[in-house]
Image: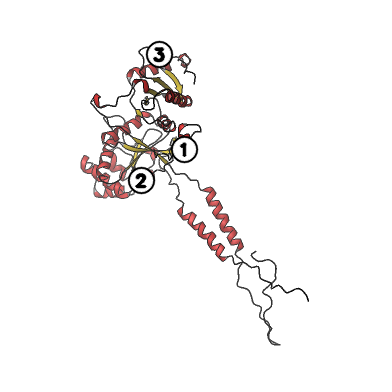
Amino acid sequence: MADLGEGGGGGGHKKGPGVKKGKKLSTRVDLTPMVDLGFLLITFFIFTTTMSTPTAMKLLLPKDTEKPEEQNKAKESGALTIMLSKDRNVFYYEGVLKPDGSNFKSSNFKELRDVILNKKKTTDAKDLVIVIKPTKGCKFRDVVDALDEMTINDVRRYAMVDISDSEQQLIDETEGNSPASTPAPPAQ
Amino acid sequence: MGRPKIARKSTWVDMTAFCDVAFLLLSFFILTTKFKPAEAIPVITPNSVSSKAAETEDQCLVTISKEGKVFVSFSEENRRMEVLEDLNSRLNLQLTPADIKKAAKIDFFGAPLNQMKSFLNMDPEQRKGERLPGVPCVDSTNNEVTQWITSTTTVFLGSKLNLMVKGDNDVPYTVFKNVIDAFKKNDQMKFQVITNQESIPINSPLAERQRAGEKLSAD
């Protein structure tokens, strides 16, 4: 209630004798419960509304060039190639893939950040290029996660390239054989 | 003498104004809340740290459902008609002006171009994502998304176009690649991927940059 005690309107002036006192009803309505209700509804709506605004991740594709001399050259020492395979497996190698596949390593998304950070620490910032190669088996989510990892780790130069046959073969071999036999990732 | 008489003031407070404010706020919140439109194509998008809200105007959205079906949609009604008209005249789809008019009320297109006529005349209740064939986007020889983007490029020429891709977590990469290839063929090199926001992992370089007060670029 908006007032405290105090009874009715407090009499008013006396009418003459014999005049019946017409009871004056107050036209004031106590709006307190209505205010309560209003704010209750506001709180209810605010709490039940979820702020679900989808966000957008911007991507810029490079133009495909036929002439090899126009393609961006990546310095061998600063390159890190990440291959995304099925079941969220990740394979990577630094620099150029050796013919015997000795620098071909297997990893997963959890370790990927350390791999990238390690590489970032050991190479000159302007030489660092990360090449993402999604294979046929990987999912959209893996690609987005890998691209997101670039943003998280503040990698300025990265590219998405189709996988080559020899790399695909190497992945197939690794996955076909027992995964335990793959060379373990280096100490983080 | 006795104490001075303190005038008894009524403690009645007029609640009308308060009540007005409460209901004004209530109606404001109700009217500004946009209901999530019932999605004909259920898609669970991947997460990313990007915090930029996706634009809702001038968009051409390519949705890829869990099964790898591709759907094309436009946010503006007149754009839908214009794109379809362009496709019709370019590829001779035999659509009548009445058919094209129907396209304005259709939220997304999800049928091969040669079945477009029956798609447009379909009962709206039937037009649900899982029952539709989707826009063919199998390989480079039969990639109708390319045709859609070509027409979109023509229609949006000179005006702003927000090209977006919304894909489910489990979409195979090959489908996504075909969509990107369709973009590339039309020289649409800039597009956005719709994601859900997730928090930036602590101790990552991005988090450190943010802590340093650097304004993060919108990428």
Q: Position of residue B39 (x, y in %)?
A: 42, 43
Residue B136, quarter of the rendered image: top left
Amino acid bearing label 1: Gln
Residue drawn at (66%, 74%), measured in percent from left and top? A9
Q: Quadrant of the C terminus of chain B?
A: top left
Whether residue B137 is visible here, answered yes or no, is no
Question: Callout 2: 10 Å neighbours few (<14), some, many (20+)?
Answer: some
Nearest the camera: B88 or B174?
Answer: B174
The residue tagged 1 is B210
- Chain under label 1? B
Q: Report the side of A4 relative to A138 (left or right).
A: right
The residue tagged 3 is A102
The residue tagged 2 is B107
Q: Position of residue B150 (x, y in %)?
A: 25, 39
Residue B49, quarter of the rendered image: top left
The colour scheme used to paint the residues is secondary structure
Task: Name the N-terminal-most of marks 1 and 2.
Answer: 2
Q: Nearer the viewer, mark 1 or mark 3?
A: 1
Q: In the structure shown, which secondary structural element does the residue marked by tag 2 occupy?
A: loop
Nearest the camera: A13 or B134?
Answer: A13
Q: In the structure shown, which secondary structural element does the residue marked by tag 3 occupy?
A: loop
Residue drawn at (40%, 17%), measured in percent from left and top? A104
Amino acid bearing label 3: Ser
Question: Callout 1: 10 Å neighbours few (<14), some, many (20+)?
Answer: few
Q: Which mark is residue B41?
A: none
Whether residue B71 is visible here, answered yes or no, is yes
Q: Position of residue A186 (x, y in %)?
A: 47, 18
